[in-house]
Image: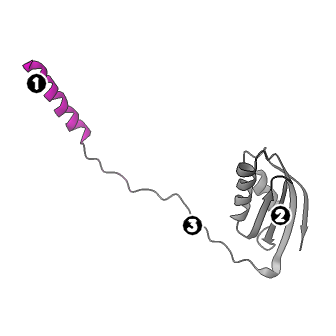
Amino acid sequence: MTISKLLLAASITGISLISCKQTASAPPVDDKVATVKHTINPEKVQTASFTITGMTCAIGCAKTIEEKLTDTDGVQKATVDFDKKLATVAYDSSLQNPESLTKIVESAADGKTYKVSDMIASK
């Protein structure tokens, strides 16, 4: 009985010594890069409407695309209607163009899921 108590005490002491080792940790790395959004010039605002195929749900697909477009520099407003498969984007034409909007949408997933068609850009 005494031997088992000694072994138990030695084990607990050994585990305590190993687990309580102080290690210096590196400071956390901030991998977020600060991005500056340009001011949108109201005189240069244009609207683009286009069809998006490949969306399978309103909450995941449509909202994700809408958020990516809205967060893009030069985009004033973006809406994506899942039922109609239609996106409407108001953007500053000096900062964005229909081709860049197409690239943003089509690269939102794996680059193969969403396809843009019937792009109509107007002022």
Q: What secondary structure predominates along the stretch shown in magenta? A: helix
Going 77% across and 55% down the picture, which residue do you hit? 105
Quarter of the view holding residue 40: bottom right
CB atoms of marks 3 and 2 within 8 Å: no
Q: How many labels does the image show?
A: 3
For residue 108, say whether it is visible. Answer: no
N-terminal of the pair, mark 2 or mark 1, is 1
Viewer-proximal residue among 78 and 29: 78
Residue segment shown in magenta: 1-28
For residue 91, say whether it is visible. Answer: yes
Coordinates of residue 9 in the picture (x, y in percent)? 14, 29
- The amino acid on which the numbered mark 2 sits, given as a three-letter code, is Thr
Q: Quadrant of the N terminus?
A: top left
Q: Quadrant of the C terminus?
A: bottom right
Inspect the magenta stretch and tell me whether residue 25 lies in it: yes
Could you say which disc has been placed on residue 34 in the image? 3
Density class for disc 2 (Cα within 10 Å; few <14, some 14-19, many ≥20) is many
N-terminal of the pair, mark 1 or mark 3, is 1
Which type of secondary structure does the marked residue at label 3 adopt? loop
- Which residue in the structure is indicated by mark 1? 6
CB atoms of marks 2 and 1 within 8 Å: no
Q: Distance between the residues labelled 3 and 2?
A: 27 Å
**Front: mark 1 or 3:** 1
- The amino acid on which the numbered mark 3 sits, given as a three-letter code, is Ala
Inspect the magenta stretch and tell me whether residue 114 lies in it: no
- The amino acid on which the numbered mark 1 sits, given as a three-letter code, is Leu
Left/right placement of residue 6 relative to residue 37 reads: left
Could you say which disc has been placed on residue 88 in the image? 2
